[in-house]
Amino acid sequence: MQIAGEQSSNISRFILFPSQRRAAKIAAYFQTRRCSCTQYVPRLSHVLNASSLRNRYNCMLHSACSMLVRERKSMDSTIVSCSRIGTSPSPCRVIIADDHPVVLSGIAKVLQPDENIKIVAMTQTVGQTLAALNKTVCDILICDYSFDEDPEPDGLALLRRIRRLHPDVKIILLSSHYDLMTIKATLNLGVQAFLRKSADLDTVLMAIRAARQSKRFTDEATADDLLKNMLDPQYPKSPAAVLSIREAETMRLLQKGLRVSEIAQMTHRSIKTVSAQKSALMRKLGARNDMELFKVLGTMT
C-alpha cells in the first residue's frame, strides 16, 4: 500500500482514459484514499503486465477489487467519457495551427462533423497563429510544437509566449519530439494535452473532451512511456531525460545546426552560458568531442 502513496503525487500530473477492468480497480483504489480517480492514470494495465511490476502492485489490486462495485457509479460520473463530447452552452471554439497542410486538413476532417466543436481559424505560421489568437475568441488551441519559420528559438519559448499572452486558452500540443524531457517540460508549462503526431487522429477528439473538463491528457504511447519511466526503475530512459530544460533547449537548437554564438543571440544568453550548457550536454550524453556530440544528437528525436 505504501507504493501507491509514494507515487500518487507524480501520477496525478497525467490522465488517460480507462480501458480495462484492472485499470478501473486501481482507479477505485486511489479514490478510497480520498483522491479523485480522475486525477490519476487509470490505464495501468499495460504497465502491470510487465513481470517486474506485477508482484509489486498485486496487493493494491486485491485491495481495490472489493471496493470496485460501490465505487463504479462515482467513477463513471467523474472519469472523462470516451463516447461523447461533454455538453456545454455553446460549441467549443478551436484554432488549429500546423505548418503542414495535410495535418491541418486531417484534424479539420475529424472535428468538423461534431456539432459541439467549431473551428474558428486554421493557421500555418507562428505569426498567423498569434494574430488569430488576438482577433478570435478561442477556447482550445491545437498547436504544432515547432514551425519551420518559427522566429522563437525553441518550441518551449513559443509555448511560454502563448501562455503569457493568452492564459485562458487551453493548448493541445502536437509534437514529433517524443523524449521525456520535452514532454514533461511542455506539461509543466501548462499544456492541457500532449499528442504524438503518430497517434491516431481520433485521439484529438479525446484530448478535446479532457481539455473541456480541465483534465490532462496524453496519447497512449506517451502515457505508457511516462508511467514506465516513473514506476519501473529498470525501464530504459532517454538520454535527454537527464538534461535540464535549458540544456534540452540548447540540444534542440544544436540539432537544427545552429552555432553557439547564434544560440546565444536567439536565446538572449551569453556565449559563455551556452558554451557551458553545451559542455554539460557532452558530459551527460557521453560525447568526447563535437563530432561525437552531433552523432548522438542525430540519433535522438
Image (spheres, rainbow, N blue to C red):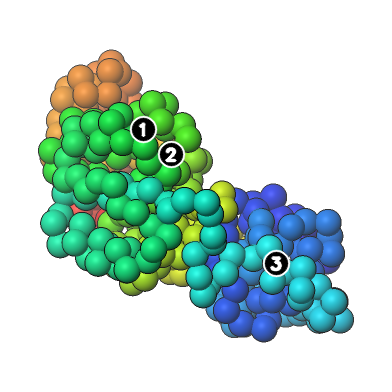
Alpha carbon distance from label 2 to label 1: 9 Å
Q: Quadrant of residue 283?
A: top left
Residue bearing the label numbered 3: 77
Q: Amino acid at mark 2?
A: Val
Compare residues 287 and 267 and report the one nearer the observer.
267
Q: Quadrant of the C terminus?
A: bottom left
Task: Identify which residue is drawn at 28% across, 57% down.
Answer: 176
Mark 2–mark 1 contact, CB under 8 Å? Answer: yes
Closer to the N terminus: mark 3 or mark 2?
A: 3
The amino acid beneath tag 1 is Ile
Distance CA(mark 1)–CA(mark 3)? 33 Å
Residue designated by label 1? 162
Q: Residues within 10 Å of mark 3 (few under 14, many from 20)?
A: few
**Residue sitting at x 27%, y 24%:** 267
Residue in the foreground of this view, choosing between 190 and 138 = 138
What is the number of callouts on the image? 3
